Image (cartoon, helix red, strand yellow):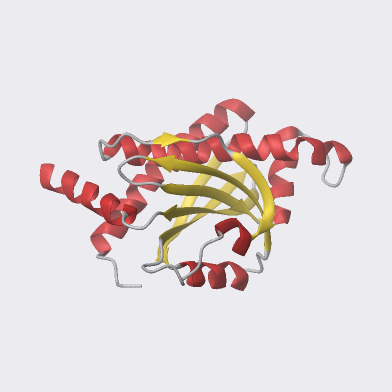
Amino acid sequence: MSQIDPFYIDTLRELINIGVGRAAGILNEMTNFRVLLQVPFIKVLSPSSLKKEMEDLGRHEVAAVRLGFKGPFSGSAALVFPPDSASKLVAVLTGEEPGTPDLDSVRAGTLSEVGNIVLNGVMGSMGNILNQHISYSLPAYVEDTVENLLSVSDHIIPPPTILLVRVRFTIQQLLVEGDIILLFEVGSFDSLLSAIDGIRADN
């Protein structure tokens, strides 16, 4: 994958930080917990390098909330948790004990709500600040392998561009890590960079 100008990475990090900041505020109000969301890094990857990145972290099967987005740039967004982080997050947010049947029954709904808040926060901040109208599909909860979740390969020419964003949730001293994966359809990532050029030209 060709090298991305650091300016774009810095701008994307800023946009995503604004989005997760908004999401943290909403989660704080909903749960009455102090929720901190931090973004330690973002990376631009190809499908194969994303798969390797996730496998290196031991995340073969994951819990994920996914939604599609369409507009000047289109693709899909997913908030992905390893199973232990997903269980800890649901237990804290619902007050249920880990490992109980009650926790399993509310798992999909709870994570879907969190995913919807975080993903809409991120995509909403991108759309608002870049002055682009983006529409979303309803979030869907899935438990699957990273490979099936992406269902894309480097054999597509050119391969789609993937933005991997590490997100760290801190709730009452509980550290939960997840990943936001933004999968851009072919050409859409270039449209995103063009929109960033647009706001740079205006400033």
Using the image, determine if residue 156 lies above or below residue 182.
below
Residue 135 at x, y percent in the picture: 41, 34
* Foreground residue among 36 and 82: 82
On the picture, is 202 further left or further right than 53? left
Residue 49 at x, y percent in the picture: 49, 72
Asked where in the image residue 58 lies, by quadrant, the reply is bottom right
Using the image, determine if residue 44 lies above or below residue 70.
below
Residue 194 at x, y percent in the picture: 21, 51
Q: Residue at x 23, y 47 (%)?
A: 195
Q: Is residue 134 visible?
A: yes
Q: Residue at x 55, y 68 (%)?
A: 51
On the picture, is 56 further left or further right than 161? right
On the picture, is 150 further left or further right than 42? right
Residue 167 at x, y percent in the picture: 52, 52
Q: Is residue 32 visible?
A: no
Q: Residue at x 71, y 41 (%)?
A: 90
* Foreground residue among 151 and 86: 151
On the picture, is 3 further left or further right than 141? left
In the picture, the quarter occupied by the N terminus is: bottom left
